[in-house]
């Protein structure tokens, strides 16, 4: 299963608003589309960290285009992206797998 670690630095004072928008919009839409998600905040750094995984039939890039191009994603209000000051992401390579 491909997995990606994403780390967002959130605009100062906006972490709570970002989390609320993400939990109410991004999270349910991503899980509906077959993604698996774990997420955390680092409050003293205004950071949001999450691991996004997908093990469906589509290639990662195809799935991401479908997600970002969906009418549901376009309709998110508020769009949590407006609160992100810096975004970083890395694909993860598994060392061990749970059975």
Image: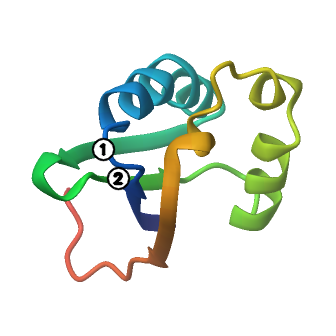
- Residue 1 visible in the snapshot: no
Does residue 21 appear to the left or right of 79 in the view shown? left
Instruction: Quarter of the image for the C terminus: give it.
Output: bottom left
Question: Is disc 2 in contact with disc 1, using a CB cutoff of under 8 Å?
Answer: yes
Pointer 2 residue? 50
Give the labeled residue for mark 1. Answer: 38
Front residue (pair 86, 61): 86
Per the model, the C-alpha gap separating discs 2 and 1 is 6 Å
SS at mark 1 in the image = strand
Q: Position of residue 3 (x, y in %)?
A: 45, 65
Report crowding for label 1: few under 14, some 14 to 19, many 20 or more residues within 10 A (C-alpha).
few
Q: Which color scheme did the rendering employ for the protein?
A: rainbow
Residue 14 percent location from the top left of the image: 37, 36
The disc, 2 or 1, on the residue closer to the chain's N-terminal end is 1
Q: Secondary structure at mark 2?
A: strand
x and y, in percent, of residue 85 in the image: 50, 59
In the rendered view, does 78 fall on the left or right side of 11?
right
> Residue at 31% of width from left, 38% of height from top?
13
Residue at x-position 48% and y-position 73%: 89
């Amino acid at each position: 299963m491909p997995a990606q670690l994403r780390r967002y630095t959130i605009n100062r004072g906006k972490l709570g608003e970002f989390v609320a928008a993400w939990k109410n919009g991004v999270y349910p839409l991503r899980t509906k589309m077959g993604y698996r998600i774990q997420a955390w905040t680092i409050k003293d750094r205004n950071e949001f960290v999450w691991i996004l995984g997908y093990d469906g039939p589509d290639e990662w890039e195809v799935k991401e285009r479908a997600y970002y191009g969906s009418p549901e994603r376009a309709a998110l209000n508020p769009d949590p992206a407006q609160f992100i000051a810096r975004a970083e992401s890395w694909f993860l390579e598994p060392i061990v797998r749970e059975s």
